[in-house]
């Protein structure tokens, strides 16, 4: 790729495969599709597939369809359909068309009838347990590449050689709701001896007497995913079905159906899935967290759902750069959460304006500062963006500082405020601690200082140096706010593998109130990003209302994950 060409955001092996298909005439255009199942909210694990599908179409001048796989009405809701569209749009994905698997139920059924007439599908009356035993089962943990060695030969169904006319009659009656759930299925007739278990006469339709969120009670049979998605791809003229590695074993079945039906030959290409430490990808477990109240909802900032990341304040550009910058591997691997947070910091550092905020306030009184004087100190909004300009911050005799910025008995190499020590107040003056005031329990409740009026704005006429600069908020002008500090929700790197009740971090949320921020934040609106100086990146939470501001910590200024792992917390 030449230097003046845009950097590709898709793996090179996918780009090369698509380019070759266009060159050799297999396809004359590129059309991809996003195939979400509307039974939950999108999470970080979905983003890789979504972005590869999107950027593959975009890079080759093609188009993307957003198709909802609504083949299981027992688990699907319109709520999820709308949420997925909203989240994908927030991520920046654009699509040419929104479709549903249910749009093709009639045509899909007609194609099934064709296979029955061709002698390539039959109605089976065996129970699920009988079919499973006849097909063979894989030992737990068997990899797809090991299935041939792990499986024993399958056993043909006693109904496998039913007459075509009988199969057609039973299938029609199944569709019309004449039979109980579980009593019959339609199976493809492929090869019960095949080393790929998915080719051992897979189920195409099962009876479900459940109302569908789009088709109502019209259907009493619903297609299995392996039957519907490949045919839907073909029906829509999808050129490239891009999916994660767990579908490698499904590809021979995908191709078998299209070959037998002589349908448009959509091509499936697989890539490694995104596995992120401390992130839960299981929809079932995520749903349990929401339904049992462990988290506040699907948009809880402790979740790596797109809604949670959005509420936490993660910019969509950070998600895109993180996912598309992971490298080009066909093998599944794990990515450290610290890597994701580093990308967040990089993006927020460029766009977030700086503000001063005190989360654990301690009163500081400047004894020699005039009682009635208020000065305006000039502060830089973003040193990474000169166009962001400056703002003024009010300064007066009584301030709030962080409790951690004062120690009555300082430990070694502590350079912040302690009796007799001098520090710089950010954008303001040098101050020297002269004493403290304590409550009846012996806790320091006020720190007293004197200031040098000749040191405003960093001036030090006599050349003296101090080793620490601390931030502050003027008490007279401070805005009281609530701050929510989010930590990792799980105590294990791979929460999908653990007992849900045993891996929840009880300290994953800390609510601080009152905290104090400078008055420039008075008009902050939900979703805005800020860097609280010396603390971290925060965004305004939607709970903010009626002049009450709530801030969520997006990410700290430094990596905390290494420390977590070193202490055994992770």
Image (tube, grey):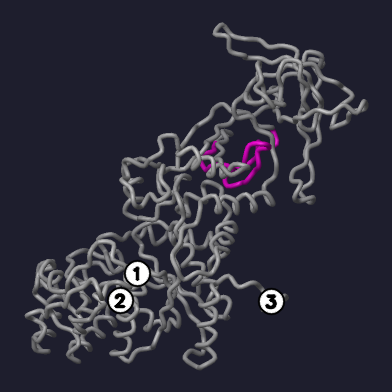
Q: Which residue is label 1 attached to?
A: 69
Q: Which residue is label 2 attached to?
A: 228
Q: Are marks 1 and 3 in contact (CB under 8 Å)?
A: no
Membership of 538 in magenta stretch: yes
Question: In the rendered view, would you say 555 is above or below 51?
Answer: above
**SS assignment at label 1:** loop
> Earlier along the polypeptide chain: callout 3 or callout 2?
3
Residue 127 pos. (x, y %)? 10, 69
**SS assignment at label 3:** loop
Give the residue at x 49% y 37%: 567
Neighbor class of circle 2 (other Cα within 10 Å; few <14, some 14-19, many 20+) is many
Residue 444 pos. (x, y %)? 62, 14
Membership of 542 in magenta stretch: yes
Q: Quadrant of residue 250?
A: bottom left
| Residue sitting at the far front | 149
Give the residue at x 82% y 26%: 429
Which residues, given as a range, are shown in magenta? 519-545
Give the residue at x 57% y 75%: 58
Q: CA distance from mark 1 to mark 3?
A: 36 Å
Residue 523 pos. (x, y %)? 65, 39
Q: Are marks 3 and 2 in contact (CB under 8 Å)?
A: no
Q: CA distance from mark 2 to mark 1?
A: 8 Å
Q: Is residue 455 left or right of residue 178?
A: right
Q: CA distance from mark 3 to mark 2?
A: 38 Å
Question: In the rendered view, would you say 181 is above or below 266?
Answer: above
Q: Nearer the viewer, residue 569 or 215?
A: 569
Q: Which residue is label 3 attached to?
A: 5
């Amino acid at each position: 790729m030449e230097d003046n060409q845009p950097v590709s955001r898709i793996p090179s092996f996918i780009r090369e495969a698509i380019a070759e298909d266009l060159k050799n005439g297999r396809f004359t255009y590129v059309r991809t599709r996003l195939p979400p199942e509307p039974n939950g909210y999108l999470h970080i694990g979905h983003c890789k597939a979504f972005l590869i599908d999107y950027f593959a179409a975009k890079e080759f001048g093609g188009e993307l369809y957003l198709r909802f796989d609504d083949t299981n009405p027992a688990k699907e809701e319109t709520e999820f359909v709308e949420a997925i569209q909203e989240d994908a749009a927030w991520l920046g994905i654009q699509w040419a068309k929104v479709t549903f698997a249910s749009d093709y139920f009639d045509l899909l059924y007609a194609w099934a009838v064709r296979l029955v007439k061709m002698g390539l599908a039959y109605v089976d009356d065996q129970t699920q347990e009988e079919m499973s035993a006849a097909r063979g089962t894989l030992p737990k943990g068997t990899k797809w590449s090991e299935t041939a060695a792990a499986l024993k030969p399958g056993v043909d169904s006693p109904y496998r050689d039913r007459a075509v006319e009988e199969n057609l009659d039973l299938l029609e009656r199944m569709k019309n709701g004449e039979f109980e759930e579980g009593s019959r299925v339609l199976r493809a007739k492929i090869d019960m001896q095949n080393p790929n278990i998915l080719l051992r006469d897979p189920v195409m339709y099962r009876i479900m007497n459940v109302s569908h969120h789009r088709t109502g009670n019209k259907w009493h049979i619903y297609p299995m995913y392996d039957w519907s998605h490949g045919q839907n791809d073909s029906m829509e003229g999808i050129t490239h079905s891009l999916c994660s590695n767990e579908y490698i074993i499904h590809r021979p079945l995908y191709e078998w159906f299209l070959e037998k039906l002589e349908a448009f030959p959509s091509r499936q290409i697989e890539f490694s899935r995104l596995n992120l430490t401390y992130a839960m990808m299981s929809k079932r477990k995520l749903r349990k967290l929401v339904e049992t109240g462990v988290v506040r909802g699907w948009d809880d900032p402790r979740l790596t759902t797109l809604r949670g990341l959005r509420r936490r304040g993660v910019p969509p550009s950070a998600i895109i750069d993180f996912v598309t910058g992971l490298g080009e591997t066909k093998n599944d691997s794990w990515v450290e959460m610290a890597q994701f947070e580093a990308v967040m910091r990089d993006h927020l550092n460029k766009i977030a304006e700086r503000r001063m905020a005190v989360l654990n306030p301690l009163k500081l009184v400047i004894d020699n500062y005039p009682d009635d004087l208020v000065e305006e100190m000039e502060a830089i909004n973003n040193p990474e963006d000169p166009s962001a300009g400056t703002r003024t911050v009010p300064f007066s005799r009584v301030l709030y500082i962080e409790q951690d910025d004062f120690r009555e008995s300082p430990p070694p190499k502590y350079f912040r405020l302690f009796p007799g020590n001098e520090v710089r107040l950010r954008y303001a003056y040098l101050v020297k601690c002269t004493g403290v005031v304590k409550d009846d329990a012996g806790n320091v409740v006020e720190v007293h200082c004197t200031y040098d009026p000749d040191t405003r704005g960093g001036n030090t006429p006599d050349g003296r140096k101090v080793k620490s600069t601390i931030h502050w908020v003027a008490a007279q002008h401070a805005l009281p706010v609530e701050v929510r500090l989010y930590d990792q929700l799980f105590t294990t790197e791979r929460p999908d593998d653990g007992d849900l009740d045993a891996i929840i971090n009880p300290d994953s949320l800390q609510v601080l109130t009152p905290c104090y921020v400078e008055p420039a934040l008075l008009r902050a609106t939900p979703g805005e990003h800020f860097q609280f100086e010396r603390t971290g990146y925060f965004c305004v939470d939607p709970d903010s209302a009626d002049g009450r501001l709530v801030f969520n910590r997006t990410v700290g200024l430094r990596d905390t994950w290494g420390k977590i792992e070193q202490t055994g917390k992770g």
